[in-house]
Image (spheres, rainbow, N blue to C red):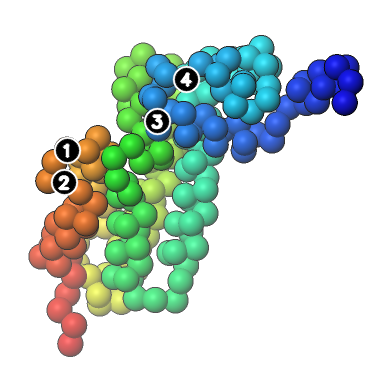
Amino acid sequence: MTRREGSRRRNIAPPRESVLAAAMATIAEHGLDGLTMAGLGRDVGMSSGHLLYYFRTKDELLLRTLEWSEGRLGAERGALLSRPTPAAERLGGYVELYIPEGPRDPHWSLWLEVWNRSQSTDDDARARQAAIEAAWHRDLVALLAEGISQGEFRAVDPDRFATRLRALLDGFSVHVAVGIPGTGRSRVLAHVSEFLADSLLLPKV
């Protein structure tokens, strides 16, 4: 391969998913401060100038990476919630999808970085974050309403209960993602399961 051919190959933009996947892996391992456009460019075979052209800033790259990751989770969540299984079973799957796998979970590492920068972001970035949160909330509200109508769940207010449940899940998830002792994934799932049994699930007849 000639030098000119090699230069042309390096100037070809890699697939968007490859760039975002590489960014997600680096942020999970080193945090956003450990991510440089030059380093990411080396990982994906793209110049830092091209990356800045596409993403403008590291904060925009972070948010775009989160949106990409959430798109994948959203598809998985949609498939889970559309299964012809009891609402309680699907709720358990929703919780398992929500809770991090463990410390430095790549998806939750993105959220921690986004939340850390939320006070300095503009209105557009906040609206994009809110849209992601709203999708999780809408799906949970719909699932709760379905479970109530089918006699699986207590007659709670779906929106209010969803808000409180997601606050519980967020709190536990942060503890798991940062590795606070005594809050591993299995223990957190047990706590949430106990909470749902006490406050939402109706006894099986």
Query: What percent of the width, then of the height, locates residue 84?
Result: 44, 76
Residue type for callout 2: Thr
Query: What percent of the width, then of the height, locates residue 163?
Result: 25, 47
Q: Is residue 114 left or right of residue 36?
A: left
Pointer 2 residue:
183
Which callout, 3 or 2, points at the residue further toward the start of the chain? 3
SS label for mark 1 = loop
SS label for mark 2 = loop
In depth, the one of 16 and 150 nearer the eye is: 16
Which callout, 1 or 3, points at the residue further toward the start of the chain? 3
Pointer 3 residue:
29
Q: Is residue 2 left or right of residue 134?
A: right
In depth, the one of 153 and 22 nearer the eye is: 22
**Are the two marked residues, 4 and 1, in contact with CB atoms closer than 8 angstroms?**
no
Pointer 4 residue:
35
**Are the two marked residues, 1 and 2, in contact with CB atoms closer than 8 angstroms?**
yes
Q: Residue at x 52, y 45 (%)?
A: 71
In depth, the one of 185 and 45 nearer the eye is: 45
SS label for mark 3 = helix
Which mark is nearer the camera, 1 or 3?
A: 3
Residue type for callout 4: Leu
Residue type for callout 1: Ile
Q: Residues within 10 Å of mark 3 (few under 14, many from 20)?
A: some
Give the quadrant of residue 15. top right
Q: Residues within 10 Å of mark 2 (few under 14, many from 20)?
A: some
Q: Is residue 162 visible?
A: yes
Q: Residue at x 38, y 48 (%)?
A: 136
Query: What percent of the width, then of the height, locates residue 97?
Result: 36, 54
Residue type for callout 3: Glu
